[in-house]
Image: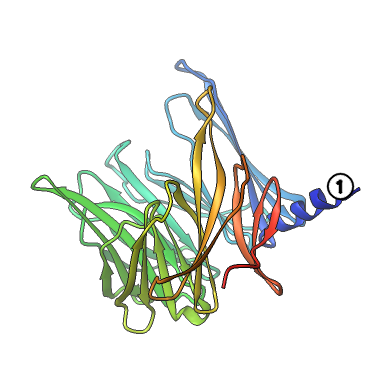
Amino acid sequence: MKQILIASFLVVSLCFSQYSLNVERIGGATHAGDANLFRASLINDGKTICSIEREIPFDVPFPASYVNEKSGTIVLTNSFDGFVEVYSANGKKMWEQNFFKGMGPNYERTITVALGSAYILFLTSDVTLPYAKIQKYTINGAKEWETSLPYSLGNAIVMSGDGQTIIAGSYAVQDNVFRRSSALLNSGGVIEGNADILFRTAAFSDNNTFIALISEREIVVISGENKKEIGRTARKTEGIITNVIWNGDMLIVQESEVKTTPDQLFHYANPTFIAYTKELKEQSRQNVPLPSFKLSRLIKTNDGVQFISTETHILLRDLK
């Protein structure tokens, strides 16, 4: 009975929001005329609300997918041909856009999305263009503005919950030197600061007072008020940084070992949880012997921060 209860809890806990996407990518096509199958199903309270399904030619990459957890708005992007498509929560296409119209297919470009409740931010780049760009649209498809970033290749983009702070990464190799930037912009597209990190994800504290930018090996904390760096540190273990969450003014960081199976499939193991001050001074750490997990997340509850994975859930009581 205990195992059944834990399984039921995990089903609820891993539905981190009202809406989520279940994406299936069924491949194997190898010849002209063959196609792979892509299916994105919108889930609400464990039930499938709608599905977007299509056949993808064998030599075209699968689209990337994004969902707004509160509204159920879905965005599909394919940087190869430059298309983005926006769907409502009932699966109806609302609008589409081609950011590279007339330029033809290209494997060396990006379209990355930050999807809010009222606006969508697209970070686009192509190796033939001088600068990566951010373009802001309303949910209904009206363009608000566009802003060029310092370098030519786009990376990740995030937006605070209130839509007032935007962070976007760009990079380039210039004169055999790797250059990187994480630009901090206001809601009008004006760049107000910069951090020297190429981040993978970000975490905003309550009221967006502090912002943590995370790569696999590095953390930078930015003041939300003056858009300046107040702390920087590198990973503390041999693993990589996989999750991060603010608990008040304390930053909880998860580092996980990366394991590879004989058939070259990877998974994570033995997470270590480290508590930092906002200036990234380590306060405590906790290691959990967990031999294997694929997906995980840190969430805040009334009892504190919990580690949730498909295999277990753990309340991190000793992190202070």
Horizontally, residue 196 falls left or right of residue 95, namely left
- Front in this rendered view, residue 259 or 264: 259
Total numbered labels placed on residues in the image: 1
Q: Residue farthest to the left?
A: 175
Q: Residue farthest to the right?
A: 1
> Mark 1 falls on what kind of element?
helix
Horizontally, residue 161 falls left or right of residue 215, namely right
Amino acid at circle 1: Ile
Name the colour scheme. Answer: rainbow
Residue 248 coordinates in the image, percent (x, y) = 54, 79
Residue 215 coordinates in the image, percent (x, y) = 38, 55
- Front in this rendered view, residue 55 or 296: 296
Q: Is residue 58 above or below residue 124?
A: above
Residue 223 coordinates in the image, percent (x, y) = 36, 79
Horizontally, residue 276 falls left or right of residue 151, namely right
For the question of whether residue 70 can be seen, the reply is no
| Quarter occupied by residue 225 | bottom left
Q: Which residue corresponds to mark 1? A: 4
Q: Residues within 10 Å of mark 1 (few under 14, many from 20)?
A: few
- Front in this rendered view, residue 102 or 43: 43
Q: Is residue 68 above or below residue 21?
A: below
The residue shown at (60%, 42%) is 294
Q: Quadrant of the C terminus?
A: bottom right
The residue shown at (59%, 59%) is 73
Horizontally, residue 26 falls left or right of residue 219, namely right
For the question of whether residue 92 can be seen, the reply is yes
| Quarter occupied by residue 107 | top left
- Front in this rendered view, residue 213 or 184: 213
Residue 262 coordinates in the image, percent (x, y) = 53, 22
The residue shown at (80%, 48%) is 7
Q: Residue farthest to the bottom?
A: 225
The residue shown at (68%, 46%) is 310
